[in-house]
């Protein structure tokens, strides 16, 4: 680790990363693989054979599954050993989210409990609170829920109306209000509740036990998907919460909510990876078995295209997720080495990579939606049948673009956080943006012909980053203070940044595999990296042009468009052949195999 370059969050926008500085999932050690296998075995033995019963919300079933997973240690992976957990690093907890991700509603219940339910106490609780709650949450004896959203306060989470008033004796806060869409609401014992004390501007967080009293709830919501996940409206009616159950400080609740959601976002990404892996395996298997026109449909180019594209998008987003996960671990190690308290360092390290967390949430959830949609299509009519596996996968995937911050809100955040870091001087965006603007005035550098592996692809990535800087720099200059209201342009910029991050991540993974395992073994990873990269070029081209058209004018616009053309130019690459090679491997292996 010590000889690695220290990487800052968001810096990828202006800097090149060396393949030696990223972690790839192929590098997980034997212990991490064993933890993963334990989770996969648990799903096989306990969850996947009960999906209908889970979705029917059979009384007590989800709780008993959480209890069993607790006995296996699955709920305590990121809990420190002093509280009875395993104290594993961030990327190992990502691997667990990934492994459990194929568990449909069970995955949602588990991740709400271990993530947004448990982590506020682990990272913001005082010693007494941690000692009282964490061991029981780690085993699953107490199950947790997170109560932020209200009927009139969703994306605008700090606008909640739930109130907390100190009682006359000064011993308890009385909480009153209505929370909505509360995952695990029906069976949780611990609720992390966000409320406003008196006329405070910001929320305060409280640890609420069900037995405190004053808690009622509506029946289960009828949902499009994740039907087995308990989702309730929870009402607090003079719910008395002892003053010692305030989490952190008064008015620190919104910060807690935001920071915990950063972790939730990247973990949600990891969960979609596990889900996509199993959907692709199911789809490949069906494509090999289903015969039409005397041939398995997996022989048809149209189907092979889908299989290859599903695998490519999964492989690419997975590369980004574990790259960022390791960045978080490295940042944590260096903060702790610098003397920071462990809980604080956990939060700080994730906060540093909040831009990457938001990108991973968006790109992974959209990857899974693509994968399940094509999964249904490969199944044809059977894709539409509730008797076959794709229907549930299709419905269950959809929520990922909505919770943990909608994808619109996360796209806005990506750009907002980048610009704020630039304004604070933490990230030099304007220097490189001005350099790109200057480059437009000069004669293009065609460079030396260089056929060293990955040189051409790296040049493309560098150019795509320039395209992003060109658009973002021009938008900031032209629109100044009104840019924050120009959401269409912000979405365009977020698209450029997100696609480039994922494309660079998969390319670095392929490069690392090439150098560590040899050309032959890395061949399909290289194919997937190139396929993703080539579609990224077009996506960046469109997003950049759309943005420029909306605020550019005259000669200046023309010059910028010339720049975009220059920065999105690449030598032809036969994506069809590459996808054929990827599909051939999937079809031969009869599963997702990368
Ligand atoms: C099944 C399920 C489980 C959930 N679990 C929990 C839980 O356990 N705990 C919890 O606290 N919450 C939970 N939620 C709530 C979830 O986080 C919210 O639904 C989500 O944050 C969106 O809020 P909203 O539904 O009020 O939508 P709104 O905020 O009303 O958004 C509606 C639309 O407007 C867009 N929009 C909103 N604001 C902006 C803006 N500024 N700019 C551009 N577009 C915008 C959104 O992207 C969206 O497309 C859950 C929701 C569901 C459906």
Image (tube, rainbow, N blue to C red):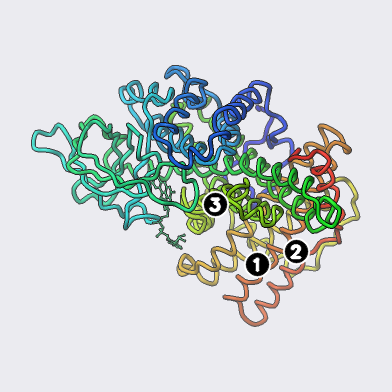
Q: Which residue is mark 3?
A: 395
Q: Nearer the viewer, mark 3 or mark 1?
A: 3
Q: Which mark is residue 253?
A: none
Residue 460, percent from left and from top: 77, 56
Quadrant of res 439? bottom right
Q: Residue lying furthest left in this view?
A: 168
Quadrant of res 494? bottom right
**Cα distance, mark 2 to mark 1?**
10 Å
Residue neighbourhood size for the residue with mark 2, other residues' Cα within 10 Å, grouped as few (<14), some (14–19), many (≥20): many
Q: Which mark is residue 568?
A: 2
Please report the residue visible at 46 percent of the width from the left and 68 percent of the height from the top: 485
**Cα distance, mark 3 to mark 2?**
36 Å
* Residue 475 drawn above or below residue 465: below
Identify the element where label 1 is drawn: helix
Q: Which mark is residue 544?
A: 1
Residue neighbourhood size for the residue with mark 1, other residues' Cα within 10 Å, grouped as few (<14), some (14–19), many (≥20): many
Please say if the residues under marks 3 and 1 sit with CB atoms less than 8 Å apart: no
**Cα distance, mark 3 to mark 1?**
33 Å
Identify the element where label 3 is drawn: helix
The answer to whether residue 523 shows anywhere in this view is yes
Left of 336 or right of it: where is 197? left
Left of 162 or right of it: where is 270? right
Please say if the residues under marks 2 and 1 sit with CB atoms less than 8 Å apart: yes
* Residue 472 drawn above or below residue 355: below
Please report the residue visible at 35 percent of the width from the left and 34 percent of the height from the top: 188
Name the quarter where the N terminus is drawn: top right
Looking at the image, tell me whether mark 2 or mark 1 is earlier in sequence order. Answer: 1
Name the quarter where the C terminus is drawn: top right
The front one of 179 and 148 is 179
């Amino acid at each position: 680790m010590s000889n690695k370059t220290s990487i800052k969050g968001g810096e990828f926008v202006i800097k090149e990363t060396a393949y030696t500085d990223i972690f790839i999932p192929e590098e997980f050690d034997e212990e991490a693989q064993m933890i993963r296998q334990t989770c996969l075995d648990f799903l096989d033995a306990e969850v996947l054979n009960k999906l209908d019963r889970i979705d029917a919300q059979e009384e007590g079933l989800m709780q008993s599954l959480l209890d069993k997973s607790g006995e296996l240690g699955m709920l305590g992976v990121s809990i420190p050993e002093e509280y009875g957990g395993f104290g594993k690093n961030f990327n190992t907890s990502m691997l667990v989210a990934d492994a459990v991700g194929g568990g449909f509603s069970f995955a949602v219940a588990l991740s709400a409990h271990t993530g947004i339910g448990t982590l506020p106490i682990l990272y913001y609780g005082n010693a007494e609170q941690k000692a009282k709650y964490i061991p029981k949450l780690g085993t699953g004896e107490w199950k947790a829920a997170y109560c932020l959203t209200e009927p009139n306060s969703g994306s605008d989470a700090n606008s909640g109306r739930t109130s907390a008033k100190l009682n006359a004796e000064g011993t308890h806060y009385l909480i009153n209000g209505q929370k909505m869409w509360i995952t695990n609401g029906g069976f949780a014992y611990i609720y992390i509740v966000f409320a406003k004390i008196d006329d405070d501007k910001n929320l305060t967080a409280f640890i609420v036990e069900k037995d405190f009293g004053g808690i009622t709830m509506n029946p289960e919501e009828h949902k499009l998907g994740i039907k087995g996940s308990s989702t309730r409206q929870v009402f607090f009616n003079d719910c008395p919460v002892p003053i010692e159950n305030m989490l952190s400080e008064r008015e620190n609740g919104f910060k807690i909510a935001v920071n915990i959601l950063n972790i939730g976002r990247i973990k949600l990404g990891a969960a979609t990876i596990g889900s996509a892996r199993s959907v692709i395996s199911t789809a490949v298997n069906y494509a090999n078995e289903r015969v039409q026109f005397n041939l398995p449909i997996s022989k048809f180019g149209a189907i092979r295209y889908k299989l290859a594209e599903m695998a490519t998008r999964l492989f690419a987003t997975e590369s980004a997720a574990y790259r960022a996960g390791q960045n978080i671990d490295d940042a944590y190690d260096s903060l702790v080495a610098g003397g920071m308290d462990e809980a604080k360092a956990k939060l700080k390290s994730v906060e540093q990579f909040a831009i990457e967390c938001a990108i991973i949430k968006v790109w992974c959830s959209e990857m899974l939606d693509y994968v399940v949609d094509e999964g249904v299509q490969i199944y044809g009519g059977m894709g539409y049948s509730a008797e076959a596996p794709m229907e549930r996968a299709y419905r269950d995937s959809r929520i990922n673009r909505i919770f943990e911050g909608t994808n619109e809100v996360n796209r806005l955040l990506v750009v907002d956080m980048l610009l704020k870091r630039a304004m604070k001087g933490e990230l030099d965006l304007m220097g490189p943006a001005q350099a790109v603007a200057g480059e437009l005035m000069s004669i293009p550098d065609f460079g030396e012909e260089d056929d060293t592996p990955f040189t051409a692809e790296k040049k493309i990535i560098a150019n795509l980053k320039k395209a992003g800087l060109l658009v973002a720099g021009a938008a900031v200059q032209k629109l100044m203070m009104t840019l924050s209201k120009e959401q269409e342009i912000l979405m365009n910029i977020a698209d450029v940044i997100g696609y480039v991050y994922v494309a660079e991540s998969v390319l670095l993974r392929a490069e690392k595999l090439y150098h560590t395992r040899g050309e032959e073994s890395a061949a399909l990873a290289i194919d997937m990296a190139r396929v993703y990269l080539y579609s990224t070029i077009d996506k960046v081209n469109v997003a950049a042009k759309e943005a420029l058209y909306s605020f550019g004018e005259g000669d200046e616009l023309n010059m910028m468009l010339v720049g975009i053309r220059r920065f999105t130019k690449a030598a032809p690459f036969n994506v069809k052949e590459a996808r054929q090679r990827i599909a051939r491997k999937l079809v031969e292996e009869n599963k997702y195999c990368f």
